[in-house]
Image (cartoon, rainbow, N blue to C red):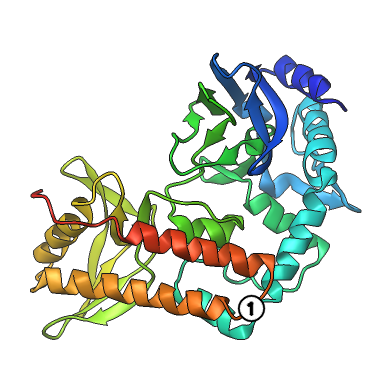
Amino acid sequence: MRWEELLAAFRSLGGIADNVRLGDGPFGRGIFPIDANAPARLWAPDALHVRVADIELQGRHMSVKDAGYDPRVRSLFEAYEAHFGWGAGGYEESYAKQAAWHALPAGVVAAIRETGALARPAQRFLPPDDALALSEYLASRRFLRDGEFYIVPLIDLVNHSGGVPGYVVGGGYGVAGTFRDEVLVCYSPNDAWSIALNYGFAAPATIAYSVGATITLPGSMRLSIAREILEQTVEHNLRVPTVSTSGDQILLSHLVLGIESAKDLPRAIFRTLTGRAGVSQSDYVFDAIAQYNRLQFIALLRLLRRYDGALARTLEDAVINQLEALCACIGAKTL
């Protein structure tokens, strides 16, 4: 199947593909505007999404279970994956990446686990096989909709950048805008470290979250910080972590330590939330957490420099990106 044939089938089923072409750039294969001065749009309606749970291997061919899909949607999806995804180097790339994760030295693995940033900790370092290669391939491309994960054909070809808007959502998933070069989208609100661990590439981010940690506070309380980034509430028109207490523990769903566009927010948010929970010396505690994070990543960087390999270099770059984002905290505004 040629690209033009794929677009024709995609459009015939309700997809929109305006001013877009397939190409190669600094992020590998991706989507580019045909005319950089004109808007580009790529959009796939809900009817073209395929549930991850309905995807299986027939040999090494990716197929869709007969689960009530329009036969034309199944045909489009399987042809797309055969010619532009899984069957066009996706399998080999996913298998090789999993082999690289499995080959990481035990000390590196332990240090990575300690950060608490793995979305799939049970399988991240397992030895590769076809089923795991498929699982990792799908996990790095899946979209969440109504509590289920889906693969969205063509949209998953768009590469990531932390400095651009996210997906256009509503009745489907898409990307739209005017792009000087490659069509890019921000995959998620994750920081540089989570992006590297869960997508397998290094990219700068405009935000930094704390690693998972439990610290003893002045007095008798303890503060536990998770990395549940999507667990949040809204206060002062800001998205902030949820806070709960359990015995002598204060539990934060996550903690922002750096925001490039609002360097005076991380400390202000921490002051407000922990002050309400009865934490004294909140600035001292915040500084101690920030220092702990910097030291964790510096130690990991020194550890990674002992080893060769593309994955070790990717993780080094991710650590540097994370440290840079951790620097985006200056002062504190009044909330």
Residue at (38% x, 69% y) in the render: 211
Image quadrant in which you'd find residue 324: bottom left
Vertical position of residue 109 compared to residue 75: above or below: below
Q: Quadrant of residue 104?
A: bottom right
Where is residue 261 drawn, in percent x and y? 28, 44
Q: Residue at x 36, y 77 (%)?
A: 295
- Name the quarter where the N terminus is drawn: top right
Is residue 228 among what the camera can see? no
Vertical comparison of 205 with 12: above or below: below
Q: Image point 61% across, 46% down: which residue?
A: 142
Badge 1 amino acid: Tyr
| Residue 38 percent coordinates (x, y) | 55, 13
Query: Seen in the image, is 195 located left or right of residue 142?
Result: left
Which residue is at 45% across, 63% downward?
320
- Residue 29 in the image: state x and y as whole percent: 71, 39
**Residue 167 seen anywhere in this rendered image of the structure:** yes
Query: Which residue was labeled with disc 1?
Result: 307
